[in-house]
Image: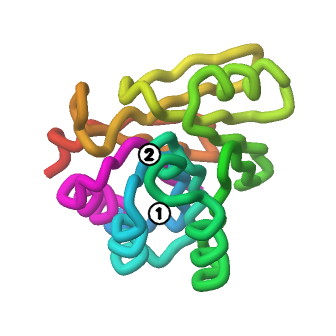
């Protein structure tokens, strides 16, 4: 199975649509978001275009803009295929234990804990892949295209290989 990881969308709906088009075209049914969708309308846009499972953790912009708990409870009640977390999220996909957060330091702590196969984060907007002990630590970059080229990542659970994808290179 392949799933996608995005972060730091910052309400860039044009770029988000490109990611969703890729995800839908490649029949990817799960998405992990490491924060900073930014506004509730961006999540609504995403839900209209992507019907798969979403695991989403707040970033600093959601904490600032969305008054956390109200937003969290509304979406949990509306859509059972969305799992929303405030600081750190967890998921299990094909027997891989996954943690995700927005913040790099928290992600490094999670990776060092040895509890997870994969840890994802955002915030820096800079795509990165490294291994800490046996844990793959990945930042998919910025889907919004702020400071760096717009990017996202996919992970294949059979090959256990992440792939960074630059939006500008998609056809």
Secondary element at tag 2? helix
Q: Nearer the viewer, residue 33 or 18?
A: 33
Q: Are marks 1 and 2 in contact (CB under 8 Å)?
A: no
Residue 13 appears at what percent x and percent y? 23, 60
The answer to whether 136 is drawn above or below residue 72 in the figure is: above
| Residue position for label 1 | 28
Residue located 34% across and 48% down the image: 9
Residue 65 appears at what percent x and percent y? 44, 54
Separation of marks 1 and 2 at Cα, in angstroms: 27 Å
Based on the displayed image, in which of its 4 quarters is residue 53 positioned? bottom right
Residue 120 in magenta stretch:
no
Q: Nearer the viewer, residue 48 or 52?
A: 48
Residue located 74% across and 49% down the image: 90
Residue located 31% across and 56% down the image: 19
Based on the displayed image, in which of its 4 quarters is residue 119 positioned? top right
* Residue bounds of the magenta highlight: 1-23
Disc 1 crowd, CA 10 A, few/some/many (<14, 14-19, 20+): some
Based on the displayed image, in which of its 4 quarters is residue 76 positioned? bottom right
Give left or right: position of 14 versus 37: left
Q: Which mark is residue 103?
A: none
> Which is nearer the N-term, disc 1 or disc 2?
1
The answer to whether 166 is drawn above or below residue 93 in the figure is: above
Residue located 22% across and 31% down the image: 149
| Residue position for label 2 | 61
The answer to whether 80 is drawn above or below residue 82 in the figure is: below
């Amino acid at each position: 199975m392949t799933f996608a990881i995005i972060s730091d969308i910052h309400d860039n709906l044009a770029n988000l649509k490109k990611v969703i088009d890729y995800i839908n075209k490649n029949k990817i049914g799960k998405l992990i978001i490491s924060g900073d969708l930014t506004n509730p309308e961006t999540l609504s846009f995403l839900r209209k275009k992507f019907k798969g499972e979403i695991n989403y953790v707040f970033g600093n912009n959601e904490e600032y803009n969305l008054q956390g708990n109200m937003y969290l409870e509304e979406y949990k009640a509306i859509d059972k295929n969305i799992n929303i977390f405030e600081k750190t999220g967890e998921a299990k996909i094909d027997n891989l234990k996954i943690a995700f957060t927005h913040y790099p330091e928290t992600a490094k702590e999670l990776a060092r804990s040895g509890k997870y196969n994969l840890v994802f984060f955002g915030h820096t907007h800079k795509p990165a892949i490294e291994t800490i002990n046996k844990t793959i630590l990945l930042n998919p970059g910025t889907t919004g295209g702020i400071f760096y080229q717009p990017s996202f990542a996919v992970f294949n659970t059979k090959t256990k290989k992440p792939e960074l994808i630059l939006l500008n290179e998609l056809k």
